[in-house]
Every structure is written in C-alpha cells, then in structure tokens.
Amino acid sequence: MALRSINLPGIGTKYELETEKKDVVAVFFLKNGNIQMYTLPHDSSDPGVAELTSAEARRLGTILTGAIMEADRESVEIAFSALSDLRISIHTYTIGKRMANKSLEELQIRARTGVTIIAVSRGEKNVINPPPSFVFHEGDTLVAIGETDQLKTFEREIMVD
Amino acid sequence: MEGIVLALFVCLILALFTKRFALPSIPFYIIAGLLLGESGLELVAADEISRFLTDLGLLFLLFFMGLEIKPGRIWRNQSAFVSSGLIDLHINMILGFLVAYVLGFSLFDAVIIAVAFYISSTAMAVTSLIENHKLLLRESETVVWLMIFEDIVLIIFLAFMGNSGGHPLLIVVKICILLGAIIAITHFGRHYLISILKREDELPVLLTFSAVLGIAALSNTIGVPESFMVIAFGTILGTIDPIAFEIHSRPFKDVFLVVFFVFFGITVNLSSGAIPLFAIIAISLLAILSKFLSGMAIGRYIHKNNHSGIEIWSNTASRGEFSIAIAAIYGSAAVSGTIATMVIITSIIGAFAAKFSGRIQKKFSSLGKPVRPVPGTLETADSGRKDD
C-alpha cells in the first residue's frame, strides 16, 4: 500500500493510494472546499469520479473506518492511542415501543450497562445531556456513548423489544 | 456610472449562463464588452470611475497570483517543471514573436504580443482540470507546474518592462529597498498582522484592500513597476497567512476583475483597421497550433507519448487573464484588439478541446498505444495540507 500526498498549486491537495491489487484511489481536497475522489481499477485506463461535499466525505470516511451505518443507526469509534489505546464508541439508536414513555431514571441505563446517554433528538429539537426525569417518546433518536462491549449490553438488555 | 451598471448586469447574466454550461466566462465578458463599447453599439464608454475599477481588477489579479506563488515549494519541485517550462517558453514565445513581427507589428508590439501569445490562462487550466475530472491524469501535475513556470516568466517580464522610465540600475536598487522594507515589516510585525487577520470585524478586509492599493500607489510614486511590486507583495504576504489574505481579497478580485475584462472589451477598437482582421485571426489560430506543438513536445519529453501531449495542449491552449493584463498594461490599440481576439478564439476552442480531449486522443491513437493515466511522475517533497 503506497500512499503519497502532494500539493497542487491553485488546485489543492492530492492523496493517492495504490492498493495491493494495483487499483488506485485518489482524493483531491480542492481549494473551493469540495472533494473529488477518483478510482482507477488496475485493468482500466478510465477512472471513475465522485464529487463530494465535505459532509459527504466525512460520512464516507465513517463507513470506511468500519463503523455500522444505517439510515437511523450510525456510530463512530474514537481511539485515543496515547491513553493505552482507549476506544470509545458513540452510537445512535431509535427508541421503539419498549422504551417509549419511560424516563431515564426508570430505565437505569448507566447503572445496568455503563452506557451514558449524551443527547436525544426529537423531531427538529435536540436535548443535550438529558436530565434523569427525561421521558422518551417513540421515534426519538438517542446518542449513546460507551465502550463497544457496554453498547452491546445496552442493545441486548434495554433496546430489545 | 450607468454604463458600469449596465456592463455589470450583462456580465452577471453571462456568468449565470457560462457557469450553467461549464464554459469559460472570460471570453464572454470580453465579447460583451466589444458589443457594448467602441467596436459595437457604443452604449458604454470608459470614464474615470471605470478606469479606477479596472485598475483595481488588475491589481487584485496580480496580488492573488502572488499569494499562490510559494518560493519554497517551487524550489523543491524545480526539476519537475524547468524542462517542460523551457520547452513551452521557447516554442510559444519565439513563434508568437515571429508571426507578430512578420504581420507588421513594431518590434516592441511584437514582444508584447509574444508574451500574451505565450502565457496560458491559469484560471481556465485549473477550472478545466477540475470540471473535466482530469485531476488523476499524470499530465495534470505537468499542467499545474507549467502554469507556475509561466507565472514566474510573467513576473520577470513585468519587473524588466516597468514603464516608469529612469535608469535600470536605479530601479533595481529601488525595488530591492522597497522589498526589503516590506519583508522587514512583515517579519517583525508578523504576530500583530496575524492577530488583525483573525478578527471578525471589518479590519482584515480593510487591511488587505488598503495594503494592496498602498503598495501600488507607493510604487508609482517612487517609480518602480507597480504590477511587479503587487505580485511580490502577494508572495511575501503569502508567507504569513495565504488563506486569510485570499479570503479577504477574493471578493475584490472577483468583482473588479469582471469589470476589468468587460471594460477591456469596451475600450478595444476592432474596426480601427491598423491590422487586417484575417491577420488577427491567423495569429489566434497559430496560438492554438503553437501550444499544440509545445504540448506534444512536453508530452513526448516528460511522459514519453503523444496522448499526454494532446492532454497538455487541450488544457493549456486557452489564453486569458494574463494575456489581457499584458495588453492592458502595455498594448497599443492594434495590440489590444489582436490580444482580445486571440483570447476569445483560443479560450473557446481550448474549452472544447479540454472537454473532448479523450475523443481527440482516439483520433490520434494510430500514433501510439493508450497509456494508463497513472501516478507517480513527481517525487513528492511536501506532504499534508499544512501550507496549502
């Protein structure tokens, strides 16, 4: 795997990666803020091109790091290599019938699983750091933070219907 | 004043049109100017205000170009671009000069035309590479470095062609003193300047605008070439925070440069008759041909095949902002008309050539095998986006 990066004056920065199978993937961060991604199969001379906004590129990046991504469930894993490889996952979930109309206090999420709910999104509104008295509604999206194992426990014990 | 407003609105409509169809906008601004001005309907004429605005357009074009020039980076990549740059310089400059001289231009005018003939449009080359999705082609790096080389030739030309008069040695001394003063101020005042650029109020924009105008005025007063000083000023400021200065000067560049192009067209008189129309068109077509020759030569020399030559030609055939700038600074009426026509014809043909370069290459496929457009021509010296 050979990665090289180069500055192209007036255009932006190019990152180019050649895979083991000799396919080429190149990403250009353009000065206008957009991103162009080229892929060139090893047996072709016609590259494919995708133009991405920076938000789209970030999304693509999350997918490529191996995180789960579905329309209503996505997660990011952050690794702090300096802190003896501490890995923290942030995951979103949609509230189903089972959790609806219960408060955070009732559910005892942190005590039972170690997972912390850091935000809830309801329609157009976001509640950051919801209080223990916060009552979930069906269809709310919540953002949970914890280690991967803790999130698994959370999915098994609390989310299941 | 009404004239400027009319011209601006015509340009606005043209900008909407050209962006919609991914065409280069510069030739259309000039055509609009020709139609509105002396050569056409005579609806708009240049006046004091328009002259001031076009001056601003030229200053910010040059300042912007200066910001893009990073001496350190050029130094590291010199091997990659000196040979192709020299091929491009020799073929086009010599051919441009000869054809202009043969057609009856004076020696001075022929030199001016040769420079305008030589220098491709960086703006159009960059847009073409991005819009036509050619960034992965290894020729795109060659094209980008060719543009930088041409910029440097232009700077040297502007430094030596200062129309201020006076003994050359005296001018060199004055330039050195002025540059030294600017470098000293930016070096010792660096932190203060950065703190100003970070502010959210009107200060950064006001600083950028008045600094550029100030350098131009100062150069005029002490008799050094203003255009050269503005570029050098941009390069020096680019060592502090190029992105901030770009952001704060971009609106001025964008607006005043459009005014500059349209009023260039307005003041050009194509019907003056000094040079017959066929001669002007001949120069323009030769300008396409000569970039084809230099492109093929560079393609063969650097990439070892003809397809690369066509790719390089199609992206560099357009003449544009810098040719017009040369005409505006030094051109007589006949020279300006010639360069205006050359820019219009080369940029429109160039735009289509760049769009259909793939098909043109197929027509040429009997000349050599198609080559995989892959990587690895330049050894990369710097990595990361830190100084971008």
Image (cartoon, rainbow, N blue to C red):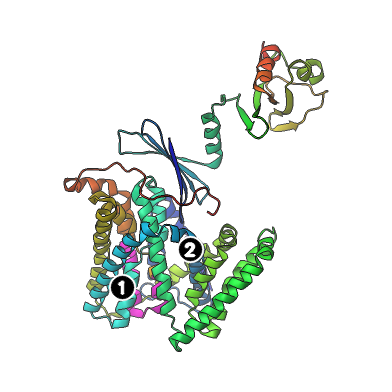
Return the x and y of residue A41 as percentages of the image width and height.
35, 33
Is B29 left, or right, of A58 in this rendering? Answer: left
Pinpoint the chain carrying mark 1. B
Q: Is residue B37 visible?
A: no
Is B4 left, or right, of A25 in this rendering? Answer: right
Q: Is residue B75 visible?
A: yes
Pinpoint the chain carrying mark 2. B
| Residue B327 part of the magenta segment | yes
The span picked out in magenta is B324-346
Return the x and y of residue B270 as percentages of the image width and height.
32, 75
Residue drawn at (44%, 68%), measured in percent from left and top?
Answer: B262
Q: Quadrant of the N terminus of chain B?
A: bottom right
Return the x and y of residue B51 as percentages of the image width and height.
50, 77
In the image, residue B151 sits, relative to residue B328, either above or below, namely above
Amino acid of disc 2: Pro
Question: Are tags 1 and 2 found on a single chain?
Answer: yes
Q: Are marks 1 and 2 in contact (CB under 8 Å)?
A: no
**Dot in front, 1 or 2:** 2
Numbered mark located on residue B114 in the image: 1
Is A29 left, or right, of B332 in this rendering? Answer: right
Foreground pick, A146 / A136:
A146
Q: Based on the displayed image, in which of its 4 quarters is residue A37 positioned?
A: top left
Q: Secondary structure at mark 1?
A: helix
Residue drawn at (24%, 43%), measured in percent from left and top?
Answer: B370
Q: Hey, which residue is sitting farthest top in the picture?
A: A161
| Residue A26 part of the magenta segment | no
Looking at marks 1 and 2 on the same chain, the residue that comes earlier in the sequence is marked by 2
Q: Which residue was labeled with disc 2?
A: B71
User: Is the stretch drawn in magenta largely helix, strand or loop?
Assistant: helix
Foreground pick, B195 / B15:
B195
